[in-house]
Image (cartoon, coloured by chain):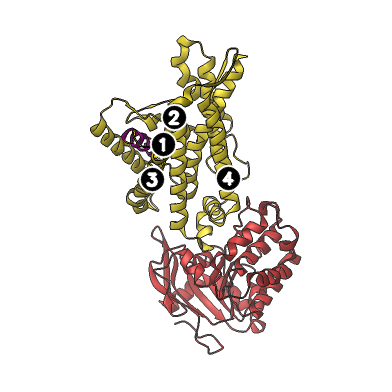
Chain colours: A red, B yellow
């Protein structure tokens, strides 16, 4: 049963009992969650829990074996990834996946492809994005592959923001980054949230993500093992238990 | 001094194979399939030239461009799109089957006897002669027009939005889709572009090889395929360069081999290919950095 978002506003995204299989092996089994407009939801959990798979399922990069995903009132099942992008969901995958052989400028231009025509002026958006991520303004004609890991992460997020999304899917943005850079990245996510974009954040660094988010979910073994509200009140022992004891959650759900 | 002529001729042939290889590389990069039937576009263009021999030249060229483009779009729509997402070997076999089908149709209609394409035959004459060196007009045209086309396509790919989307799709097709790039649009664009490159290659091949048979495109495709493997399949520039290299090498070896030993041309060229791939399996012009795809 998906928990209603704390704000009481109808959710923009509803993941309903979603299951994904890879060659007969379940990666996600009956996952449900909702996101309200402007909310930051963190999904944490051990390696291989299915966190990336969940984002890929929303993006329609992975097909569902059962369940549904409702985005702004419409099912995403018949959509292809490009339709999902153009309907307001932006995706920053694990490992960033910027186009290394294209320049920073070209990467950004690709981000603006799914920008709705009703959005504010692109130049304005580019200015805002450049203020969030100075690396954008500095090295526009550099090949993106020459940037450092942290800079590439910033470029990937900047690129996603230029689509003016209502929901931003972030898969492990802190992976491989130095602590100072991670702080900078999270600061920018805060500004993104303040600008009204909902964020679904997948992270292995559970503590930071959970403190930051409005709500958190622990995904383990393809199932939601536990749910948490306001970040400040989170009991880390309970989180750890959810990571490692998901077998008992399976019994409880089943 | 004669080596200068060999060089110029080889550059002319190289540019032609670069055009064909670029068309193949475009389709491979954007659609992730090796189009074994690419040469049949040239064959179809050749028979179109045969059938329109009495028409004014500009109309003939337009007719060829139209026929070749429509054929390419039909093949994509009917044979390739239903296989989207299938294993690469499946699509390869499909293109092989399409190639076979088209060649059989041509054979049924026009037999294996060569038909004259009668295009720009005046081009096979020398443009200038200096002592032993004869540089034919068609070689100059191939280098000029072919080179110009390669530059034009390069500009299209690097300076236009659709070109940017094509390059992004070639590098990381799923990531490109998650950015909102419409796969069908990019695929159609790559199909049309590759067809027009094939038509241009035909116009420049025709003066030197003026007789079209059902097998006309087959060897050209093989050589161009070898070219894109040798050059590097993951970058369009590398594929075109590979096509150029194999065409150039083949022409040079042909010129340098004593007449009686020209039967060994294929062995020599493919022997070179084996050596190259043993030492640089990713392709001669491939960058060492591996692009990771989503």
First in residue order: circle 3 vs circle 4 = 3
Q: Chain of mark 3?
A: B
Residue A200, percent from left and from top? 57, 73
Q: Note whether residue A74 is visible.
A: yes
Q: Which residues are magenta?
A: B41-51
Q: Residue at x 54, y 36 (%)?
A: B145
* Number of marks drawn: 4
Which of A107 and B144 lies nearest the eye of the viewer?
A: B144
Q: Position of residue B181 (x, y in %)?
A: 51, 60
Identify whether A71 is placed above or below B12.
below
Circle 2/circle 1 CB separation < 8 Å: yes
**Mark 3 — residue?**
B66
A138 and B279: which one is in front? A138
**In this view, B95 is above or below A181:** above
Using the image, tell me which numbered label, if any, was put on residue B154: 4
Assess disc 2: are there few (<14), some (14-19) or many (≥20) residues with their C-alpha within 10 Å of its C-alpha. some
Q: Is residue B134 left or right of residue B84?
A: right
Q: Are marks 3 and 1 on the same chain?
A: yes
| Of the image marks 2 and 3, the number of the one nearer the N terminus | 3
CA–CA distance between discs 2 and 1?
9 Å
């Amino acid at each position: 049963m998906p928990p209603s978002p704390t704000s009481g506003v109808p959710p923009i995204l509803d993941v309903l009992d979603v299951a994904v299989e890879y060659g007969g092996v379940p990666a996600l089994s009956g996952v449900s969650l909702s996101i309200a407009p402007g909310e930051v939801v963190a999904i944490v959990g051990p390696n291989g829990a299915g966190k990336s798979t969940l984002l890929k399922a929303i993006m329609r990069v992975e097909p569902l074996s059962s369940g549904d995903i409702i985005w702004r009132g419409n099912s995403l099942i018949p959509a292809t990834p490009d339709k999902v992008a153009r309907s307001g969901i932006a995706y920053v995958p694990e490992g960033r996946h910027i186009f290394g052989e294209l320049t920073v400028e070209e990467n950004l231009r690709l981000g603006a492809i799914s920008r709705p025509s009703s959005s504010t002026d692109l130049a304005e958006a580019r200015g805002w994005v450049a203020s969030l991520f100075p690396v954008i303004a500095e090295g526009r004609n550099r090949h993106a592959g020459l940037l450092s890991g942290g800079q590439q992460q910033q470029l990937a997020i900047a690129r996603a923001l230029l689509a003016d999304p209502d929901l931003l899917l972030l898969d492990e943005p802190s992976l491989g980054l130095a602590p100072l850079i991670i702080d900078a990245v999270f600061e920018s996510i805060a500004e993104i949230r303040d600008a009204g974009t909902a964020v679904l954040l997948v992270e292995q660094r559970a503590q930071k993500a959970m403190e930051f988010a409005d709500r958190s979910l622990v995904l383990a073994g393809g199932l939601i093992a536990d749910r948490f509200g306001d970040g400040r009140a989170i009991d880390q022992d309970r989180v750890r238990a959810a990571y490692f004891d998901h077998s008992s959650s399976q019994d409880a759900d089943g | 001094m004669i080596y200068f002529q060999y060089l110029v001729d080889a550059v002319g042939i190289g540019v032609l194979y670069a055009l064909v290889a670029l068309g193949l590389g475009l389709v491979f990069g954007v659609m992730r399939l090796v189009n074994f039937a690419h040469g049949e576009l040239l064959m179809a263009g050749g028979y179109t030239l045969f059938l329109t021999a009495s028409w004014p030249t500009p109309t003939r060229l337009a007719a060829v461009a139209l026929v070749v483009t429509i054929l390419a779009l039909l093949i994509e729509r009917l044979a390739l799109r239903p296989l989207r997402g299938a294993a690469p070997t499946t699509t390869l076999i499909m293109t092989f089957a399409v190639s076979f089908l088209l060649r059989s149709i041509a054979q049924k209609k026009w037999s294996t006897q060569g038909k004259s394409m009668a295009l720009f035959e005046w081009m096979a004459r020398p443009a200038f002669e200096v002592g032993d060196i004869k540089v034919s007009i068609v070689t100059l045209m191939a280098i000029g027009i072919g080179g110009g086309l390669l530059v034009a396509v390069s500009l299209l790919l690097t300076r236009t939005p659709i070109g940017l989307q094509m390059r992004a799709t070639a590098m990381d097709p799923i990531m490109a889709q998650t950015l909102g790039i419409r796969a069908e649009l990019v695929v159609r664009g790559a199909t049309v572009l590759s067809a027009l490159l094939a038509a241009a290659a035909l116009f420049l091949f025709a003066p030197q090889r003026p007789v079209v048979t059902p097998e006309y495109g087959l060897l050209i495709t093989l050589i161009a395929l070898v070219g894109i493997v040798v050059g590097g399949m993951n970058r369009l520039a590398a594929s075109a360069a590979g096509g150029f290299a194999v065409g150039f090498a083949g022409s040079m070896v042909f010129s340098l081999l004593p007449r009686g030993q020209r039967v060994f041309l294929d062995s020599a060229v493919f022997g070179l290919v084996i050596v190259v791939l043993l030492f640089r399996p990713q392709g001669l012009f491939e960058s060492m950095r591996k692009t990771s795809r989503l």
